[in-house]
Image (cartoon, rainbow, N blue to C red):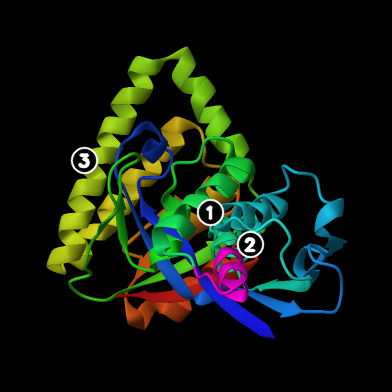
């Protein structure tokens, strides 16, 4: 018996970091990037689970993993939720085309795919709400105090207007648009970036709250523009959001260089995406300018570029 499940990556278009402080954010799935989990039944004693994740050089048994390891937490969380104390012996194989620690949702995608594959393997597929909740618990281990946006957009596989603590709200893309994602090649731990913003907020909450409020206005305007198909308006909003993220202290020399390069090469706007301090940036690009912008980003030091059509 073998069961396979997949989940997409994600990109935050607007609102990262401020979303932790209950401001809205916009995120969309990246279906060209996928995490895939295959669960295969093997001969063995109930409860014996072998985990194979070559992308992160992991080959171990579940029993050998610490309880706070995200993979162990997801696996045990699924079986606890389903009331299963001794699951059938199996091998869990994890593969992903989503770059790790780059702000594209690799951890959440693995958690979602793993939850769906395991629950289907034991004949009790979990509904999206449960999948989302379990993935969020794993995000706590990855990121400390996550907003929940990653697991939400990845679980539902639709564009999400997200406010922490409020019901999931999807939005429609009125007209398709293209983004080029530029990877700095610098792994960025969201947990550390979130903690840095928290310290800055504790030192000067009044100033940071003003920045978060400005981000909220940008997000609202961006959602309206996307839904109305006014794509050209998104470029300046991306530039404004990036400037606000710089005020939060989460940009970097590499991210600033790539966003400036994208704008000079013809992008309508550009910003960092995700935790910052490395990871990825995104640029809004007209179709005819994709190759030029992507090539310029790579010449400026981007480790890789990914082109995605949104909507």
Q: Please indicate whether residue 4 sits to the left or right of residue 268 in the image.
A: right
- The quadrant holding residue 4 is bottom right
**Magenta stretch, residue numbers:** 114-125
Q: Which numbered tag is attached to residue 217? A: 3
Picture coordinates of residue 187, whole percent (x, y): 67, 52
Q: Which callout, 3 or 2, points at the residue further toward the start of the chain?
A: 3
Count of numbered badges drawn on the protein: 3
Q: Which callout, 1 or 3, points at the residue further toward the start of the chain?
A: 1
- The answer, for residue 274, to whether it is visible in the render is no
> Foreground: 286 or 132?
132
Q: Nearer the viewer, mark 2 or mark 1?
A: 1
Report if residue 24 lies within the magenta region.
no
Residue tagged 2: 301
Residue drawn at x 23%, y 70% is: 173
Secondary structure at badge 3 equals helix
Report if residue 124 lies within the magenta region.
yes
């Amino acid at each position: 018996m073998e069961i396979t499940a997949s989940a997409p990556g994600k990109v935050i278009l607007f609102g990262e970091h401020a979303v932790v402080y209950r401001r809205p954010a916009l995120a969309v799935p990246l279906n060209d990037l996928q995490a895939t989990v295959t669960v295969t039944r093997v001969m063995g004693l109930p409860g014996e689970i072998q985990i194979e994740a070559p992308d992160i050089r992991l080959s171990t048994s579940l029993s050998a993993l610490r309880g706070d390891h995200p993979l162990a937490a997801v696996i045990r969380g699924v079986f606890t939720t389903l009331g299963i104390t001794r699951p059938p012996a199996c091998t869990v194989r994890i593969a992903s085309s989503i770059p790790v620690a780059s702000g594209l949702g690799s951890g959440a995608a693995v958690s979602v795919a793993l939850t769906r594959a395991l629950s289907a393997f034991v004949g009790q597929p979990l509904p999206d709400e449960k999948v989302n909740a379990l993935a969020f618990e794993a995000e706590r281990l990855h990121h400390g105090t996550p907003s929940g946006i990653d697991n939400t957009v990845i679980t539902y596989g639709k564009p999400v207007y997200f406010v922490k603590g409020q019901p999931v709200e999807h939005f429609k893309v009125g007209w398709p648009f293209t983004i080029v994602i530029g990877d700095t090649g610098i792994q960025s731990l969201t947990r550390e970036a979130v903690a840095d913003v928290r310290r800055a907020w504790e030192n000067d909450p009044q100033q940071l709250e003003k920045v978060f409020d400005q981000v909220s206005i940008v997000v609202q305007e961006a959602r309206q523009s996307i839904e109305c198909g006014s794509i050209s308006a998104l470029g300046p909003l991306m530039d404004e959001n990036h400037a606000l993220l710089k005020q939060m202290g989460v940009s970097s020399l590499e991210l600033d260089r790539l966003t400036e390069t994208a704008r000079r090469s013809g992008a309508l706007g550009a910003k960092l995406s995700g935790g910052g301090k490395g990871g990825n940036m995104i640029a809004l690009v007209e179709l005819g300018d994709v190759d030029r912008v992507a090539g310029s980003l790579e010449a400026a030091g981007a480790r890789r570029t990914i082109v995605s059509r949104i909507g």
